[in-house]
Image (spheres, rainbow, N blue to C red):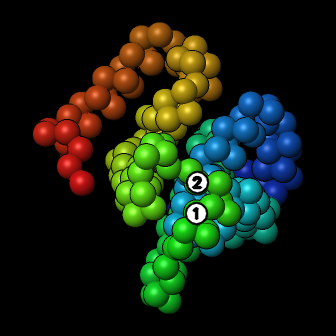
Amino acid sequence: MSKSGSKALTREEFVQAYTALSEAAQVRLLRHAEVLSFKTNMSGEDLLSEAVLRTIEGERNCPVGTTLTTFLYGAMRSIADAERRSLATEGTQIGLETLAEDGVEPANLERNAEEAIVAGQDYSARVTALLGLFAGDDVALLIVMGDLDETPAEELREMAGLDKTGYASVRRRIRRTLATTYPQGWKA
């Protein structure tokens, strides 16, 4: 049982489900981990490994019925947020060397270093804010994550267990949430 009282996967069930993930799902998880690891001292691979390890060790519990990729995304987001808070209290700064080591490249090669860092921070802030809006809605979060990863709609419907009507309903819910939260569009 998880701390909230809902049934959670056992260690063995989690390991079995994790090892059964398709290669495509593993690649998507790693891509999300790389985005989430921005402004931490962790690589995307380290972040994903940490989320898996903490689940295996029982520090985190995957509720039965929650999509494994959605659970791992939430765990990675939580770990990355805690890492950022820890770094902020230590006064650690991210330098250009760290960005280069992490493979972060400016989208526009005409940008100077400061503009590249600001653009990266803005992107990270947008992704974090967007995903935070749907943290309590596993299906919407899965679809938002899939949109960020450019996953085809048919694959998202299958992963979420939705038919076309259900998928359209979730998309409307996402659009309404965004319109309500950002009526004037994203403002930094």
User: Where the N terminus falls, by quadrant?
Assistant: bottom right
Q: Which residue has dot 2 on it?
A: 104
- At horizontal 62% and vertical 61% (from top left) the residue drawn is 100
Going from the N terminus, do you reach mark 2 or mark 1 first? Answer: 1
Residue type at the position of mark 1: Leu
On screen, residue 81 versus residue 44, left or right, reads left
Q: Residues within 10 Å of mark 1 (few under 14, many from 20)?
A: some
Q: Nearer the viewer, residue 101 or 171?
A: 101
- On the image, the x and y values in percent for residue 121 come to 41, 59
- On the image, the x and y values in percent for residue 177 come to 26, 37
Asked where in the image residue 122 lies, by quadrant, the reply is bottom left
- On the image, the x and y values in percent for residue 136 come to 42, 48
- At horizontal 50% and vertical 35% (from top left) the residue drawn is 148
Q: Secondary structure at mark 2?
A: loop
On screen, residue 48 versus residue 158, left or right, reads right
User: Where the C terminus falls, by quadrant?
Assistant: bottom left
Residue 121 shows in this picture = no
Residue 29 shows in this picture = yes
Q: Residues within 10 Å of mark 2 (few under 14, many from 20)?
A: some
Q: Which residue has dot 1 on it?
A: 99
Could you say which disc has been placed on residue 159 in the image? none
- At horizontal 78% and vertical 50% (from top left) the residue drawn is 14
